Image: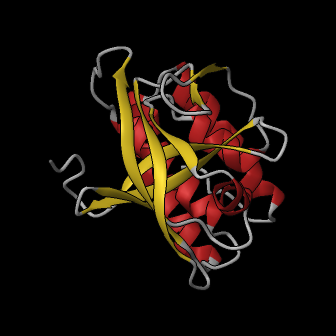
Amino acid sequence: MTRLNSRIHEVIVTTLDGEGSPHSAPMGISEVNGHFHIKPFKPSATYDNLSRHRQCTINYVDDVRIFAGALTGHREWPVHPCQQIEGFYLQQALSHSELEIVRVDDDSPRACFYGAVINEVTHVPFRGFNRAQSAVLEAAILVSRLEMLPVEKIQEELRYLTIAIDKTAGPRELEAWQWLMTRIEQAGIRIDDH
């Protein structure tokens, strides 16, 4: 059964560090032939954690502060223990999948961890996205690539994304947006007024 029909889905992957504490990171994952493909960069905490402990949780969230927070130093989110694996899921997760890593292709610059679903749980119904949530996710991706993209491209994208923020953002989206804008300004990029 295919769960993810498009090429990449933005989720939060929670792994365990060497001391058994949860580490949550935003990541694009896909599903091919019944296995979730998790492709962390090397080096990264997610890569190290999955190399050591071959279980993780995929969190499906609509609170975009979690995505923005991972890039801006706001990383502490409450968790609950998983049911079928040694691990944790985010309290804010609408649902989560508990995975066992069954195979690894350890290529550079990214490894691919193939995860088999051990357990899936739905916590609350998904009520749909607003445009501001999507805008925050796109801005978070820009922030993750500040060193790679031209300044003009970042400014152009932000001008467009700001329209959705102005029209549809609630308190969570506004907080996440501000975290990201502060990070962009700290990188020395001027944010155009609209």
160 vs 64: above or below: below
191 vs 119: above or below: below
Measured as percent of width and height from the top left, residue 143 is found at: 64, 59
Name of the residue lying farthest toward the bottom: 108
The residue lying toward the viewer, choosing from 34 and 168, is 34
Q: Residue at the spot x=61%, y=83% of the render?
A: 109
Q: Is residue 162 visible?
A: no
Find residue 191 and report its image quarter: bottom right
85 vs 39: above or below: above
Question: In screen coordinates, is 122 left or right of 190?
Answer: left
Measured as percent of width and height from the top left, residue 113 is found at: 50, 64
* Tag count: 0
Find residue 42 and report its image quarter: bottom right
Find residue 14 and report its image quarter: top right
Q: Residue at the spot x=28%, y=64% of the render?
A: 7
Name of the residue lying farthest toward the top: 124
